[in-house]
Amino acid sequence: MNLKELLVQFKEELSGIYEVQEIAAIFDLLVEHVSGFNNRHLALKGISTSLQDEFAMWGYLGELKTGKPVQYVIGETWFYGLQFKVDPAVLIPRPETEELVEWVIESCMVRSEGGLVSSKDDLSIIDIGTGSGCIAVTLANKISGSRVTGLDVSSEALETAKMNALLNSVGVTFVQGDILDSNATVKLDGKYDVIVSNPPYITPEEKEQMHQNVLDNEPHLALFVAKERPLVFYEAIADFALTHLTLGGLLFFEINEHLGKETMQMLNDKSFINIALKKDMQGKDRMIRCSLGA
């Protein structure tokens, strides 16, 4: 069976789960994962799939038909140009989080008199709710000389994050702890120049708008927050920042698009300054940056 025929089969088998364009994108990702070449390159070269590759593709199709996300099927994904291992213990990194990372990196850059741009020296950074470690590992990779810590309540997630640090050849200190438990953060007794977090922020009412394969496969611990206190993680992290952020240090959040004003007000009430709300590529309120004044 050639690639075109195999793609037709994928579209037929997955038509009730994904849109046609999504199926094509998933197919291309699997072809590259199995063969090492992208679909277009194979087509240009007139290369057909081998029996071994075809067998692997059929196996992946079987998993996809259960609704399992393709990133979990192949066990990896790309984030900000880096490769990451992913499994059901961690969220699959999203493009919106790449935008948050980009904002952090830009904010940590300084311009010299000669016009050269480089990162500030010896920055101490903590990523709270690190999950796969995509934020922590990327910042350690992209901001030279930085000292990065990743905190998460899940021991399983931390194991995946540690693998990703090794995979990308960076040193990140990973700590298990619950940011909602003040006693659990005692071990984090240092000061940080940057605190960044993409905490749980999806309310129960928003579940109906989510794709079923996300609800069935990704960790609810990292997704959902109670309706009664939708900002509970933001409040706890802000309180942590009041005592652990250096003077003039920066606090970054990825946020619920519907709670931008409420999150900004909470930060203002806690005396943070220079509070900035930023939209993502889809025009949704998605990120906040603020700093700690005197």
Image (spheres, rainbow, N blue to C red):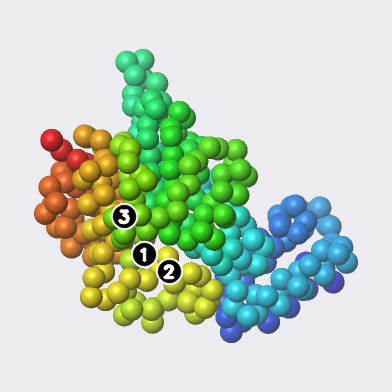
Which residue is painted at 27% across and 42% down in the image? 244
Give the residue number, with chain letter if any, for mark 3: 183
Instruction: For the residues labelled 1 and 3, say whether their Cβ atoms are less than 8 Å apart.
Output: no
Q: Circle 2 — which element? A: helix
Give the residue number, with chain letter if any, for mark 2: 221
175 or 280, which is in the foreground? 175
Nearest-to-viewer mark from 1 and 3:
3
Relative to 260, does residue 117 appear above or below in the rendering?
A: above
Q: Considering only order in the chain, which callout, 3 or 1, is on the residue closer to the N terminus?
A: 3
Residue 139, x across and y down, in percent: 45, 40
Q: Residues within 10 Å of mark 3 (few under 14, many from 20)?
A: few
Nearest-to-viewer mark from 2 and 1:
2
Question: Which quarter shows the C terminus?
Answer: top left
110 or 272, which is in the foreground? 272
Q: Residues within 10 Å of mark 1 (few under 14, many from 20)?
A: many
Q: CA distance from mark 2 to mark 1?
A: 7 Å
Q: Considering only order in the chain, which callout, 1 or 2, is on the residue closer to the N terminus?
A: 1
Nearest-to-viewer mark from 2 and 3:
3
Give the residue number, with chain letter if any, for mark 1: 200
Q: Residues within 10 Å of mark 2 (few under 14, many from 20)?
A: some
Query: Label 3 amino acid?
Result: Asn
Residue 105 occupies quadrant: top left
Which residue is painted at 58% across and 59% down in the image? 86
Instruction: For the residues labelled 2 and 1, say whether their Cβ atoms are less than 8 Å apart.
Output: yes
Q: CA distance from mark 1 to mark 3?
A: 20 Å
Question: Which quarter shows the N terminus?
Answer: bottom right
